[in-house]
Amino acid sequence: MRVHEYRIAGEPVEVRVCTSEDDLELFDVWARDMANSREPVAVDTETTGLDVFSVGHRLRLVQFGDDHTAWVIPVEAGRPFWQAAIKWLTRLPRMVVHNAAYDLLVLDRHMGLPLEETFPRVTDSKIIAALIDPRQPQDGGVGTGLKPLSAYWIDPNAPDTQEGLTAVFRSLKLTKATGWAGVPLDNPTYELYAGLDVLLTSRLLKVLRRVFVELGIRPALVPYEHQLALVCAIMQRAGMVLDEDYVRQLDAELEREAEHFARIASRFGVENINSTRQVADCLLAMGEALTERTAGGAIKADKAVLLALADMDLQWNRLDIRRPNPLANAVVRSKRAGKWRSAYVQTFIETMDANGRVHPNVNPLQARTGRMSINRPALQTLPSSDAMIRRALLADEGHVTVSCDFAAVEMRVLAALADVRRMKEALHAGRDLHDFTAELVFGPDFTKAHRKLAKGIGFGKVYGGGAATIQRQTGAPMEQVRVALSAYDRVYPEIKRASARWQREAMSNGMVIETVTGRRQPLDRDRTYAVVNYMVQSAARDVLGQAILTMHEQGLTQYLRLPIHDEVVASVPAGEAKELAKAIEDCMTMDLFGVHIAAEAEIGGRPWGSLYPNCPAY
């Protein structure tokens, strides 16, 4: 046995690495004692990378530990180690894992331990940390990573081993991407790093539980979030079929498109489309007035600015308010083609499993407000009207894609939380809310442009966007935006009153607001107006979360593939599509404080993109 001694918060700890079957017998004694004590055992894995289902992904180590002792089991070294790890992963009654979905998916794939059996015995310390403070470091929080949390709550020196391991990778001429697969199994820094993770996780859970109770956070959120994490992990495990031929064709097309528009930009003097200065200088030379500046004083020429110059809104729809600037148009199109190629198409190819499926990471508790996200690739960043990328993802053989989307859920949640009388009456009467608002603000002869502005103001209230943002998104003249904003506040005065009330509550509670479901939402003192966004987005997320759990209870999880924004994507047998689409729709339909939360399911062809215009439904 190799033993690495270390100190955490001034206390001596040991990392014990099993190297023989005699060592495994000692581990067995320790694990049996821990199981009998009913204390949670910290568990972690070390693998060759983050893409669990990609070809060549391997499990190398499994670690177990408490506050003072860690056991590193090198399962890659042979069958006895493998069997010892499986034995106690199966028998331990209580475990704690930081970011449990990842490690339990690893154990599901590589050790045949189903998520459905391991997850109910696990507490995820990352979930507890997110319920205490959902902010990432850039937002003023600690974040939810194990090392930052451990440095904050346990020992400021906790991340030291991570830096040491990076140095080991460099010494072996490995990168962060290749180091996890290439570092020798018996490297002492690697072993110490692995063992410390469970020691820190064990200690972290105790601290977080104490803080959780001290803050009076709603206890029911813990099982709710764990159950939701399980369902999302099941979706990730299922994945979606990739249309590989289409993806490789699309890869070549996007490469050509990026190069084509880059050449057009070069004719105007822009040799590097990613050089903001070059782009700005050339636009100024063309007579464009660029008035916005960054915090550092540089001229802004970001996506929002360029789209406006190209006469498009943020969803790439034509505004028809000016002549499109050809340079701005070329730059945004070249950038988009390049981004879509690297972020989506090439990621699909890199992460595809041996069966031709991709497994986007589903993060059920990701954003500050708790909203879910998808990464590898970040599918939630796709434009709402896009079919090009979505066409690459297919339902299973003999299945079709079903998408069920909430109808204007943010506005409905806002109406419910702020008790907006006229808005609730319109929704109860089945009126189109944006038509109704446009009529109140502009009169019965409102135009499509008026409706677009009314819709933009509504979302501005939800997302915290001011007049400048609304003007950029809608293309309406600034004076018209300001007048419409004032009228909006007159017809829906409850929104402004609710915002003021929530801000007062936060200020009297250490700049923390409690959402309708009991979440803590820290509020920034210089952005107190964002309280409406936090309250609405958090509640909308829990509306979706509850719908997903209802689907799980109804036995629909086997069909679910992605939760994305306010939409659920499913793969269902073609012959049962109508019945299953109706069942999903029913699960997503509910009431919130007297406001009807409506959902509508659509049945497409096999590609997800078939639910969008200009995509074949084969």
Image (spheres, grey):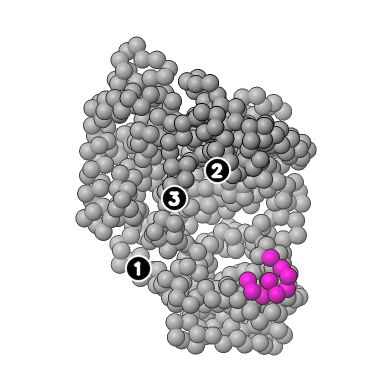
Return the residue at label 2: 277
Q: Which residues are magenta?
A: 166-175
Q: CA distance from mark 1 to mark 2?
A: 48 Å
Within 10 angstroms of label 2, few (less than 14), some, or many (20 or more) residues? some
Q: Nearer the viewer, mark 1 or mark 3?
A: 3
Q: Which mark is residue 124?
A: none
User: Foreground: 141 or 375?
Assistant: 141
| Residue type of the residue flagged with mark 1 | Val
Q: CA distance from mark 2 to mark 3?
A: 13 Å
Question: What main secondary structure does the magenta stretch of the protein show?
Answer: helix
Return the residue at label 1: 211
| Residue type of the residue flagged with mark 3 | Gly
Q: Quadrant of the C terminus?
A: top right
Nearer the N terminus, badge 1 or badge 2? 1
**Can residue 167 be found in the magenta stretch?**
yes
Q: Which mark is residue 296?
A: 3
- Res 592 seen here: yes
Q: Are marks 2 and 3 in contact (CB under 8 Å)?
A: no
**Can residue 561 be found in the magenta stretch?**
no
Please identify the quarter of the rendering in which residue 522 is found: bottom left
Could you tell me residue 453's position as x and y percent? 39, 25
Label 3, secondary structure: give it. Answer: loop
Residue 576 relative to residue 499: left or right: right
Could you tell me residue 467's position as x and y percent? 35, 33
